[in-house]
Structure formats: structure tokens, C-alpha cells
Image: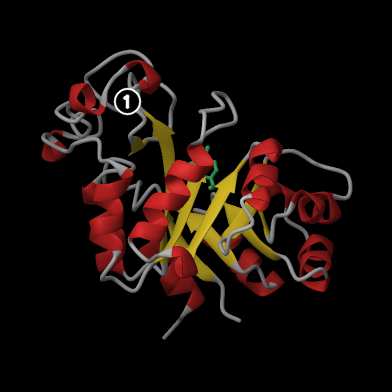
Amino acid sequence: MQAKIFAHRGTSKHAPENTMAAFSLAYQQGADGIETDVHLTKDHVPVLMHDERINRTTNGTGYIKNHTFNQLKDLDAGSWFSPEFIGSRIISLDEFLEWIQDKPLYLNIELKNNKIDYNHLEHIVYDRIAHYHLLHRTTLSTFNPKSVKRLKHMNRNIGVALLISKRYKNLVSAAKDLGANAIHIKYRLLNQLLVDRSHQENMAIRVYTVNKPKSMMRSFSMGCDGIFTDVPKTAIQYRDPI
Ligand code: G3P
Ligand code: CA
């Protein structure tokens, strides 16, 4: 099966990451899916941002967990990237799900609970996805093995991926034992044996963050199930040459 191309935080090379501008651009460019990151606010609203703190990508400061959604929603999440995007906002998971609901896109929602293990994040996110009837095209991923286990114990019908950034002995069996049905690995860990081993065990293998044409072609030729890229348009050109 052809590798799926996921826009990493949206088309984050050309628009501010994890904003509607980056997601819309990914859709316009023909990405198969969107990867995004979720944290919880002080009042337990799931919001989309990569970092635990709002400092790098907004005009605010501090931790997401110390702000209510009302305090976050009017911050500027675009001007750090370029003046063209002044007015871009932090969005809630609900706003994203509402937007994606009528579009033929896959979702990869990364639970950002490896540094702050937010209480009940798994249930909160799952319930919102179920509410929008999007479970069948969603994968939840996390670097936190305990969270993979908790997702498995929720015993619900949704794709779960273990994220890995370092070498890991017996990775495929370890991920499978936790209850994952996919592994999402850093590009430098990619090799043919790992792809074959994943497929023998019925596990999908997807790779991040693949921005160079040479790395895209290597991932496609090895049979990866998906790549995460900041430049989906380029990836499509290399995957589907005319
Ligand atoms: O989900 C793949 C990738 O996004 C994981 O790393 O740091 O970009 O969230 P990071
Ligand atoms: Ca991510």
C-alpha cells in the first residue's frame, strides 16, 4: 500500500505550526492526513500546540496547564512566524475536529504527555474524537509508554502508535506488548529490517520528520506506511511522479 503523507503540525514549513492556516494549507496541497499535538489547559480543554509552554509560538508566556482556554484563545500564534500570519490563534481540539470532519483526511493526534502526564488526557481526547465520529480515521500517538498502555486498557477501537526517537531493543515486540498497532520512528532509526519486522507483526510503521527528497524516496521505497513532513506538497511530488 502507498505511504500516506501526513502534514507535520500542518504545512509547518510555510505557515505557523498547529494553526488553522497550516492545516488549511495542508488540505489545499493534497496531504493525506494531518499530524498535530495536544495538551490540556487549566480548565481541561484540549488545545493544539507542540510545546508545553506558549513562549515560542505565541505572544504569551508560561505553561498551557496554568492558563484557561479563555486566557489562551486570543493570543497571537502567527506573528512569531511571519507578519503575514498576525491574527492566527491557538485552537482547541474541538475546533480542529469540526473543521476536519467533512474533509477526507486522516488524523494523527499526538498526546503530548511525555513531559507532563496530564490527568485523563487519553479519555478526554478519545471522547472528543468519538463525538465527531472520527475514530475510524484517527491514530493517537505518544512517546509515553504508560499512556499507550492506558489507551490499550480503554479497550477501544482506535489506532495507537508508540513514538520513538532513540534506538530501542526489540522495539516492535515491545510496542506490541504495550498494545500499540503502529510505531512512529525518527527518520534516523529507519532501516529495512525494522520495516519488514513491523509488517510481519502486523504493525504499521511511520517515520518523522521527513523533509528531504532523498529521505522521502528512501522511506517510500522501503515500504513505510506513512511519513510526517513539514512539506507535504514536495512529498506528494516524489511519491506520485507524473
Ligand atoms: O508525531 C511525529 C512527530 O511530530 C514527533 O515529534 O517533536 O515533532 O512532536 P515532535
Ligand atoms: Ca508531534
SS at mark 1? Answer: loop
Asked if residue 230 can be seen in this view, the reply is no
Which residue shows up at 35% across the image and 46% down it? Answer: 12
Residue 172 visible (yes or no): yes
The residue at which mark 1 appears reads as: 43
Residue reaching furthest to the right: 170
Front one among 110 and 57:
110
To which quarter of the image does residue 104 belong? bottom left
In percent of width and height, residue 147 lies at: 64, 39
Residue at 73% across / 49% down in the picture? 189
Residue in the picture at 60% in, 30% down: 114
> In the figure, 235 relative to 187: above or below?
below
Labels in figure, total: 1
Q: Position of residue 98 (x, y in %)?
A: 25, 57
Q: Which sits in the foreground, 68 or 212? A: 68
Q: Quadrant of the N terminus?
A: bottom right
Around disc 1, counting alpha carbons within 10 Å, would you say few (fewer than 14), some (14 to 19), or many (20 or more)?
Answer: few
Horizontal side of residue 1 vs 238, given as left or right: right
Quadrant, the C terminus: bottom left
Q: Picture coordinates of residue 2 (x, y %)?
A: 56, 79
> Does mark 1's beta carbon lie closer than 8 Å to ligand 2?
no
Left-right relation of 24 to 137: left
What colouring style does the render use? Answer: secondary structure
Instruction: Pinpoint residue 26: horizontal percent, then vertical percent.
Output: 31, 60
- The residue nearer to you, when weighing 57 against 182, is 182
Identify which amino acid the numbered label 1 is placed on: Asp
Q: Is residue 230 above or below residue 79?
A: below
**Left-right relation of 25 to 192:** left
